[in-house]
Amino acid sequence: MAEADPSRPQSTTKITDVDVDSLAHCAGYLNLQDLSNLAMSCKYFKRVAYSDSIWLRWFSWPKQILSSSSQTLEVREAYMARRTALQQFKFVDPFVADLYTVSQPYSHIAMDKNDVVFSQGSMIGMMKIDSCLSGRQSFIMRSDHNARITCMRLFSLDGTSLFKSDAPGNENILVTSSCDHTIRLWWKGSCQRCFRGHNGPVSILSDKLLGEVGGKVLASGGEDATVRLWSLNSNGKRGQQALKATLYGHEKPVKLMSVAGHKTSLLVTISKNSKVRVWDTATSSAVRSSCCVGMTSVPGAPVKMKCHESMVYVAAGSSVIAIDLRTMQKVLTAAVYRPNLYSVEIMPSKSLICTGGNGSVMLWDIRRNQETLTPEPIVELESHTGPVTFLHMDQYKIVTGGPEDSYVNVLETDTFTQTNTLICCSTEQASTSSGCAGLAVNGYQIVTASYGEEHGLIRFRDFANAACPVVESGDDHASKFWDPQSYSDSGGSDC
């Protein structure tokens, strides 16, 4: 390489010598994550990342919303405030789509982008919102399973070799397990694979895929007390041929399982008798039980289990216990609700646990309870009739519901303040409805389920373009917080 000529003056221009407007024009092509990274790099780039010209491009909502907000806020602040309000469902005029089904309990509901997937008995239902908007056929039912569906998961095709030649990386595959002893893989509305191997009903599927890219493995647990590992590759293996290994050790049916956060080959399982086992699925051994690398037990019937980094949080009976997977020692009791927990959501990234009890919801701070043997909740809200069996929690909101209450409540995660109340059934069916029979939340969208004597109802709400904010009221009606207009799905209210 030629050396620089010392006689020629060297340029001393730095990127910070470029004016803010020019850099903002370039930064306008970044996504939100990259903008956030830019803002954290230095004070000058923070000014660039906060420029109004950038955030005007992101502000895709009606301009009158920006005009009303920008009187007191900069464009970025107005954008973030509205985005947060939409995430917290603080509006009365979402887009609403109703789907009527047979009058039968719902076992599971999930959201796959703009598709809603649910199960009733042995049936899988798929509702395509985009098709509904365009007036095309928007609903299909599939009856490939012969008995009740016990678990339903969505996994990204990215990182697997399934349907490699046909599938873009951002698509998901649906996996279901059933009392008919089978596991089925669904894609594009049809069953593509059927795995057989369990000697009884398949009770649970892993919450994530095990292994590395290109060698992904699905784990399942059954009433036969075994854990089975299935290869997800594109070589066409079906049925028992896809079965990689069968892991023995549990004495009772396997109820829950979760993949460790710090090592993707570790699988944590718990059986009906509350025995916890940790398996290293990468271990190759002729002795199938030797894959077990850790054991412990917890008191009470299993309710929920979630791994985060090297910890696993196990909700069982009336308590939530944190266990260190490296030592299998119980680190702390993070929450206690007596006589027993009905539902639990765990967000270790914010050190929060939300528990559902009989009529009440509690929020717990994991860090605060590290130093005490008797954990106390941050706050408790008596907000429902009957047990709270459905919970969703993300960084913006907590959504709660139960089978004896026709309404779901929406709370701010940081303040536990109620932001909205949404009805699950049609107003005329409120007195005869099952209450909330299912719940799924994804960003600005929420799906609820209910069923009555005549039919079932899947109700989809999308708040992405909502404009009329909820109005606080002192009236003492069903929601205790908000005007009756917050129950209206007509979308025609005056703001």
Image: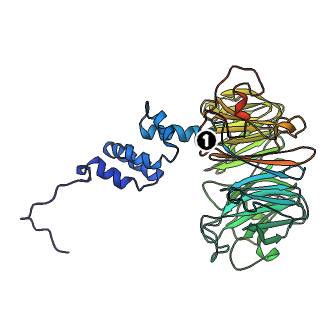
Q: Is residue 256 above or below residue 195?
A: above
Residue 147 lies in quadrant = bottom right
State whether residue 406 appears in this view: yes
Q: Is residue 192 above or below residue 427?
A: below
Q: Residue furthest left?
A: 7
Q: Residue 157: horizontal and vertical position, in percent?
A: 64, 66
Q: Residue at x 69, y 28 (%)?
A: 377
- Decide if residue 373 is on the left or right side of residue 438: left
Residue at which label 1 appears: 466
* Circle 1 residues within 10 Å: few <14, some 14–19, many ≥20: many
Q: Amino acid at mark 1?
A: Ala
Q: Residue at x 83, y 40 (%)?
A: 300
494 or 263, which is in the foreground? 494
Task: State which quarter of the image contains the C terminus.
Answer: top right
- Decide if residue 444 is on the left or right side of residue 183: left
Q: Secondary structure at mark 1?
A: loop
Q: Residue 309: horizontal and vertical position, in percent?
A: 60, 50
Q: Residue at x 45, y 37 (%)?
A: 77
